[in-house]
Amino acid sequence: GHAGQSALLESRILYPRRKEKCLQFFYRLNGSPQDKLVIWVKKDDGTGNVRRMEKLHTITADGEYHWKLASIPFSVQTKFRYGFQGIRGDPAKSAGGIAIDDTSMTETNCPTNIWHIRNFTSLFNSTSKGDYIISPVFYSSEGYAFALQLYPHGRNSSPYMN
């Protein structure tokens, strides 16, 4: 293909019950550094047709080729579709492409804090019971700061084994 070519993947028509929405999915951009993933919503245009498009978010390649989680908040009260548009960057500098997986759309607010632990298998294999890691500092919607401790094998006092 040529630079600038695109493909569009759309959901079926959805009928909302609540205004707030959260579109979550995993994505991986391992092609050209100019690749883009654009997330759209198509709304009822007032005539009963779902064709009024609104761009929600654009994700660009950042040179990191691991899976990432996206949480895209939006509001809509009429029937709608959401869609993913992949736009090809420079095909001469591409060794892959754009991948999306585990897409979910909920009628709730998106999470404000996500702790992504990379290479959990390695962490699990290099720790023992009682060892823990600490999350980055997160902030609640009320402004409180907090962090989490994760014990991959459980606390020393835990009765569970293996």
Image (cartoon, rainbow, N blue to C red):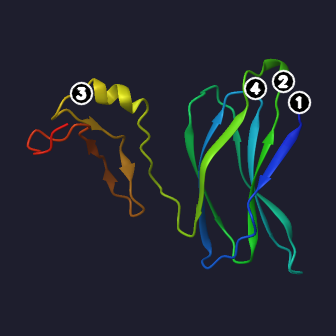
Number of residues whose C-alpha sits closer than 10 Å to that of mark 2, classed few (under 14), some (14–19) or many (20 or more): some
Question: From the viewer's perspective, is residue 119 above or below residue 139?
Answer: above
Q: Which residue is mark 3?
A: 127
Decide which of tag 1 and tag 2 comes sooner along the chain.
1
Question: From the viewer's perspective, is residue 117 above or below residue 102?
Answer: above
Q: For the residues marked 4 and 1, what is the alpha-carbon distance in whole angstroms?
A: 10 Å
Query: Looking at the image, do the residues carrying marks 2 and 3 touch, with CB atoms under 8 Å apart?
Result: no
Decide which of tag 4 and tag 2 comes sooner along the chain.
4
Left or right relative to 116: residue 29: right
Q: Nearer the viewer, residue 114 or 31?
A: 31
Q: For the residues marked 3 and 4, what is the alpha-carbon distance in whole angstroms?
A: 37 Å
Q: Which residue is mark 4?
A: 32
User: In the rendering, which numbered label is found on residue 3?
Assistant: 1
Placement of the N terminus among the 4 image quadrants:
top right
Decide which of tag 2 and tag 3 comes sooner along the chain.
2
* Amino acid of disc 4: Ser
Q: Residue drawn 65% across and 30% down?
A: 62
User: Outermost residue, front direction?
Assistant: 162
Numbered disc 4: secondary structure: loop
Q: Which residue is mark 2?
A: 91
Query: Looking at the image, do the residues carrying marks 1 and 2 touch, with CB atoms under 8 Å apart?
Result: yes
Q: How many marks?
A: 4
